[in-house]
Image (tube, rainbow, N blue to C red):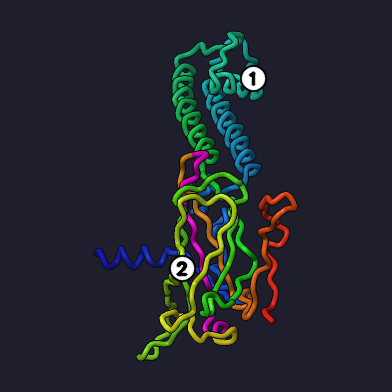
Amino acid sequence: MNRKLLTQAVARLPIVRVRVQDGRFQVLGSNRWYSYWRDPYHLLLTIPWHGFGLLTVLLYVLTNALFALLYLLGGDGIANARPGSFSDAFFFSVQTLASIGYGAMHPQSLYANWIVTIEAIVSILGIALLTGLAFARFSRPTARVMFSQVAVVAPHEGIPTLMFRAANRRRNLILEAQMRVYLMRDEITAEGNSMRRFYDLPLLRSQTPSFTLSWTAMHALDPNSPLYAATTESLRQSRATIAVSLNGLDETVSQTMHARHNYAPQDILWNSRFVDIFHESSEGHRYIDYRDFHKAMPIE
């Protein structure tokens, strides 16, 4: 019996489509709000604000329309309302659901009072749920971290080193920031099976006590590196992707923030270096010019 239930549960799982485009390994529909239609809570958290507002208004109108029909089924149960008037029943429902109570219309039968009681309970639960959802959407920490559009491979301390940049666009403090870098590529095992393998790429400095302006991450391509002796062509053949994950504590909201970025093989510029973004003014002050943040130049 358990095996039968497991088979039925697996059969209901959606089909996940994967493609490789421009050297990037993509799961189709990943992180799209409409991909959460089977999970209403995540759907309401990820749907755009205009969609959230439209859905709220639609649900509000449908709820009041439903209760208006219930009031009409009870006959002349609303005082001062026109007999059989849907609009009067609808706006009485609006007043009841919002606890307005103007006093012009009120229930005058046992049936109508029971419907009012049910609607009051629905109102309490609905307001609590809507307030919680709105607060959850507002309070979600969002990272405004910018990664360089390209990564470069340039000598550092005599060793070829993979480098890329990250910048904090909010200019506030991200405390105890940590960065992890992974190599993902397709490999064939000794048994002939195709597998997607993940490798850690250790950084020369993987954490910083405060991430305020910019951060250049560096991974040495020594014999211990999974990228040792790799080329653009070999990375393309293995459908390789370099994934970057950054997290830290946002000092402003005291919440953990996350940011991620992927580099495809064509995003890696070999024998190149980044254009320097640190400059010194004539008065001796240091400043950063972010206009050159994404720029790289070949090493002569």
Q: Callout 2: few (<14), some (14-19), or many (20+) C-alpha neighbours within 10 Å? A: some
* Foreground of the two, 60 or 209: 209
Start-end of magenta stretch:
235-253
Q: Position of residue 255 (x, y in %)?
A: 46, 43
Q: Earlier in the sequence, mark 1 or mark 2?
A: 1
Residue 171 shown left or right of residue 3 in the figure: right
The three-letter amino acid code for the residue at tag 2 is Leu
Residue 214 shown left or right of residue 129 in the figure: right
Mark 1 lies on a secondary structure that is helix
Which dot marks residue 203? 2
Write the residue at 61% across / 32% down: 61
Write the residue at 49% across / 26% down: 123
Q: Position of residue 209 (x, y in %)?
A: 45, 51
Q: Position of residue 152 (x, y in %)?
A: 61, 74
Residues at discs 1 and 2 in contact (Cβ within 8 Å): no
Gap in angstroms between the C-alphas marked 1 and 2: 69 Å
Q: Position of residue 224 (x, y in %)?
A: 41, 81
Mark 2 lies on a secondary structure that is loop
Q: Quick check: is 252 in the magenta stretch? A: yes
Farthest residue toward the left? 1
Residue 266, placed above or below residue 170: below
Residue 141, placed above or below residue 239: above
* Foreground of the two, 169 or 17: 169
Which dot marks residue 88? 1
Q: Quick check: is 262 in the magenta stretch? A: no
Residue 203, placed above or below residue 178: below
The three-letter amino acid code for the residue at tag 1 is Asp
* Foreground of the two, 77 or 2: 2
Farthest residue toward the right? 282
Q: What is the quadrant of the C terminus in the image? A: bottom right
Say which of marks 1 and 2 sits in front: 2
Write the residue at 65% across / 66% down: 149
